Image: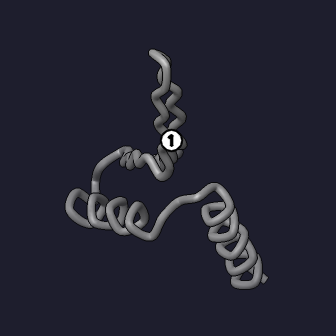
Amino acid sequence: MHKEKYRELMLRFAKELHDVGVTENMKKIIHDKIDRTPNVVSSTVDENIRKFHYTHGGYTIEAVQNIKIVIKTSK
């Protein structure tokens, strides 16, 4: 029973990370940070995944899509 629920939650979590846009590189960075300091309370990775910059006639338009993943321990 618990094994099936755990598997269901892990698949849901993986799908949500993918839908938000978390990259494999971000997952690796978080994993490495937690491995390096296993007693850390929180670990964060921030990455700009898309950036648009346009300048014309004295105006600049810039749009940035930023993804942030935070892993925290909870009690």
Point out the residue furthest to the top here. Answer: 58
**Screen quadrant of the N terminus:** bottom right
Quadrant for residue 37, please give it. Answer: bottom left
Q: Position of residue 45 (x, y in %)?
A: 38, 49
Q: Secondary structure at mark 1?
A: strand
Depth check: give the residue in front, 14 or 20.
20
Depth check: give the residue in front, 34 or 17.
17
Residue visible at 47% across and 52% down? 49
Colour scheme in use:
one colour
11 vs 33: above or below:
below
Q: Position of residue 74 (x, y in %)?
A: 52, 46
Q: Is residue 45 left or right of residue 21?
A: left
Point out the residue furthest to the left here. Answer: 36
According to the image, label 1 marks what residue?
52
Point out the residue furthest to the right here. Answer: 1
Q: Position of residue 30 (x, y in %)?
A: 36, 59
Q: Amino acid at mark 1?
A: Phe
Q: Position of residue 35 (x, y in %)?
A: 26, 66
Depth check: give the residue in front, 5 or 63.
63
